[in-house]
Amino acid sequence: MKSNIIIPETIKVGFQNRDDTYTKKLAYVIYYDHKGVLRKEASWNSWRDKDIPDLSLLNVPTSGFVLNKKAGGYSSGWNHRQTYVRVYDPRDFEFEISVPNLLYILENTNSIKGKGLEGEFVYGWDGTELVLIPTSSPDYTEITQFNNILKEKKHIKGKELLMGATYKTKDNRELIYLGRYDYYGWKGEKEGKKYFFYNKDRYSYFETMKTLGDKIISVVSEDCVENYAELMDELESNSHYSPYDESKDELVDCDYEVFKSKVTNDRWGTKFYSEQGIIKVSENYPDPSFYKVSIEVPSSWGYNRDEVIYEGSLKNIYETYNPKRKNKYLSNGNIYQKDTM
């Protein structure tokens, strides 16, 4: 279970009359977030029967939950409904959880026939989905610690950030701070300065923020990470840190073995630069011993077509056309893309 699940202090419960429930009423449970906002209030109000008084309850560890029955799991025309499991809350109402939530519960506690689920539970929200969390689960402590930080409503300011230190976001991700630099868009346009972070949860993934607001909520470690230099090297080869500079493009000879590998591994043909312009080398089907060289020429239909200008062995093509590929560079001189078209 993800540790960025919200465990609110207070929940609010609305009801509909349902004959297929043990209590004759089905509940829709929502919650007050850490800013005191009642989440999903509009859909909750449109769903509930306003003639049935709603409940406001403290979301404290509670025992006595009982698995009831399967609900949903059908498709009729445009009417589709996922499978859910109904659970009895000892405060005398029933609500629904997902099957993955049920499996997680059963991994961490027992369901005793005639007595219900063993142990205490709290309500949580994974995004917009309600989840019932056993307090005996190993994730509960981490989830609780994260929620305690959110309740403190503290956040880290930009001037407090330390280079190479690790921080936690309000959605419980860990980011390594790399500095505040000019940010360049995909077309190389400057968009002003942004804070650059490395996301530890995703390999080679840089994340930027124009302003921090309340996004950074705590310090994981003030120590500079051991691979800080490597991360900076990687950042300095990122086009958002330094834009691509077309004037630095460099055509380089393509080694024969590399040329051979590219052509033989791409049945649709591989493009190269040559003195004759851009050529495409591809199989000369159905004779696999020979290959063909083609260039694009305009057709009478308004689009380009391939025109074969040479046929022969790969070795002959290589020696005749001296194929090249392109290295692209950023404005800071670092390689951007190697061996490309």
Image (tube, grey):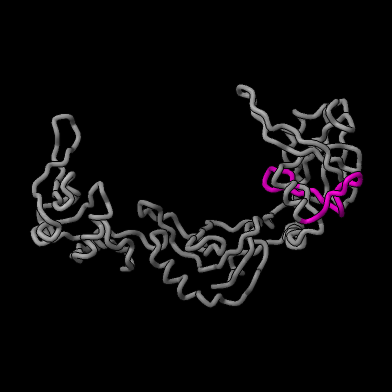
Instruction: Give coordinates of residue 142: x percent, y percent.
Output: 73, 62
Q: Which residues are magenta?
A: 108-131
Q: Residue at x 83, y 32 (%)?
A: 26
Q: Residue at x 87, y 44 (%)?
A: 57
Q: Quadrant of the C terminus?
A: bottom left
Which quarter of the rendering shows the N terminus?
Answer: bottom right
From the viewer's perspective, is 322 left or right of 153? left
Quadrant of the rendered image containing residue 251: bottom left
Q: Residue at x 13, y 30 (%)?
A: 300
Front-lying residue, 122 or 163: 122
Coordinates of residue 182 in the picture (x, y in percent): 44, 61
x, y percent for residue 85: 76, 39
Magenta stretch encompasses residue 147: no
125 lies above or below 165: above
Which x, y percent locates residue 146? 72, 60
Number of numbered discs: 0
Q: Is residue 158 visible?
A: yes
Image side of residue 264 versus residue 144, left or right: left
Is residue 136 left or right of 300 when viewed as pictured? right
Front one among 304 and 191: 304
